Image (cartoon, rainbow, N blue to C red):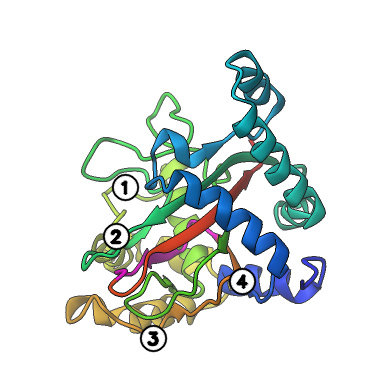
Amino acid sequence: MNSLLNLKYLEELDNNGITKVQNFLSSEELEKIKNIISFYSAPKGHENSYWPSNLRLLLYKVIKLNFKKLSESLYFLDLAKKKKLNEFSNKFFKEKSYLGYIDAYCSEISDKEILPWHTDQAYGDDTGPYKGGEKLSDGYVNPDHFFLKFFIYLTDVGPDDGVMNYITESHKIGYAIRKGIFEGKIPYQRYWHLKDFRKLVFKKENENYFQNYFKDKGLIDRFLSKTEFINKDVNEHKFNYKMNAGDAIIFNEGGVHRGSKTLYNKRMILRYMYSIK
């Protein structure tokens, strides 16, 4: 198991928005967790895909006499402590952070993407004026209120088989957009989908904001070049993170990413999500 306290992971996360940790789980840990998740075989978002992440939720399982879920939750919390997830998250945020969610789910074999190219914590999508997080009086979310996500793979994933795709450096632009909208420096427009994200970046009236915000003057051009594919072929494999069972990725959810199709095998994953709020 690779130690998260190796500075290279924090540096990669800061620079690229994502980092990969090979052999994150031991073979014994992998087998135990797979057995737990296989018992429920819950899809993403199902009530059986969540485990308590704090004392209040643990006590609720005691009250409900759900000792099986309680025992599993204690194991997952102990695993997070053993792997120093909170310690790593504190270093990333440069302040005290908190575990927000623990979930684990199965994605069945399908010819549909798990999720298309998008950015999390976008202020709006097709379902309403804002997406996720804390709704303030102006309808926007504090740009610093986002999740650092730990994806621990319990099955092998590859191209068109459940792999994570991530546009490196895009987390920096995602943060700048959230901050600019939150502070009223650029007008809001929907940007959850990558095509809309690019339109916002391309918009002439936003040019001065981005030029003044970024010291790295080549960042926007690199992003636009990397993402030209979206107008031709959404199924671009250049940005995928092929993983073996027991590997993990840690990523800033504000970057542009997607979950590919699961054409050949069921995908099984354990997730921890940390934030500063």
Label 1 crowd (10 A; few <14 / some 14-19 / many >=20): few
Answer whether labels 1 and 2 touch (C-beta < 8 Å). yes
Q: In this view, does 116 lie above or below 135?
A: below
- Look at discs 2 and 4 and give the one toward the viewer: 4
* Image quadrant containing the C terminus: top right
Residue 258 lies within the magenta run: yes
Q: Which stretch appears magenta? A: 252-262
The disc placed on residue 205 is 2
- The part of the image, by quadrant, that contains residue 98 is top right
The disc placed on residue 238 is 3
The alpha-carbon separation of the residues under discs 4 and 3 comes to 20 Å
Residue type at tag 2: Glu
The residue sitting at 23% across, 75% down in the picture is: 234
- Look at discs 2 and 3 and give the one toward the viewer: 3
Mark 1: secondary structure: loop
**Relative side of 272 to 186, left or right:** right
Mark 3: secondary structure: loop
Q: Name the residue under label 1.
A: 187
- Look at discs 4 and 3 and give the one toward the viewer: 4
Q: Position of residue 112 (x, y in %)?
A: 22, 64
Residue 112 lies within the magenta run: no
First along the sequence among labels 2 and 3: 2
Label 3 crowd (10 A; few <14 / some 14-19 / many >=20): few
First along the sequence among labels 2 and 4: 2
- Look at discs 1 and 2 and give the one toward the viewer: 1
The alpha-carbon separation of the residues under discs 1 and 2 comes to 9 Å
